[in-house]
Amino acid sequence: MARITKEGWFGPSATGSIFPMPKSWQGWLAYVVFIILLALTARLNGEPAWIARIGIIAVFLCLTYFAFDPE
């Protein structure tokens, strides 16, 4: 897998869950920004809210995929 960062921002969870865990401050920042952006969409109603949420989730999943370090 081609990583877009010099160091891995995310790594495997120690508990074996499917969600990657942050390994650096950049990973923690990405998680915080992800949660804040999802919380901001709570004020939206209807179809724009779902489009925004799907876009936010897709970008976060791509980021975790390309900044993941399995070691």
Image: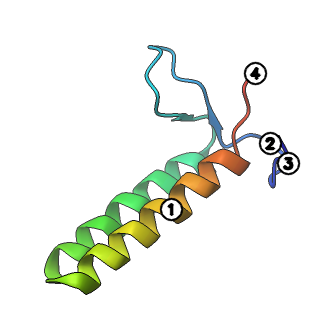
Between marks 1 and 2 in the image, the one whose residue lies nearer the viewer = 1
Question: What residue is shown with label 4?
Answer: 71
Drawn side of residue 62 relative to residue 32, left or right: right
> Which residue was labeled with disc 3?
6
Q: Residues within 10 Å of mark 4 (few under 14, many from 20)?
A: few
SS state under label 4: loop
Q: Nearer the viewer, residue 21 or 26?
A: 21
- Assign a secondary structure to mark 2: loop
| Extreme residue toward the front, this view | 47
SS at mark 1 in the image: helix
Q: Residue at x 82, y 40 (%)?
A: 1
Mark 3: few, some, or many residues within 10 Å (few <14, many ≥20)?
few
- Quadrant location of the C terminus? top right
Query: Which three-letter amino acid code belongs to the residue tagged 3?
Result: Lys
| Amino acid identity at mark 1 | Ala
Image coords of residue 3 (percent x, y): 82, 47
Side of 10 relative to 45 (left or right): right
Q: CA distance from mark 3 to mark 4?
A: 14 Å
| Contact between labelled residues 3 and 2, with CB atoms less than 8 Å apart | yes
Which of the marked residues, 2 or 4, is nearer the chain's N terminus? 2
Where is residue 33 shown, x and y percent of the image? Answer: 44, 63
Image coordinates for residue 35, horizontal then vertical, percent:
34, 58
Question: Marks 2 and 1: in contact by CB < 8 Å?
Answer: no
Q: Are marks 3 and 4 in contact (CB under 8 Å)?
A: no
Say the numbered circle drawn on residue 7: 2
Cα distance between the residues tagged 2 and 4: 11 Å
Hey, which quadrant is residue 32 in on the image? bottom left
Q: Mark 1 highlights which residue?
A: 58
Amino acid beneath label 4: Glu
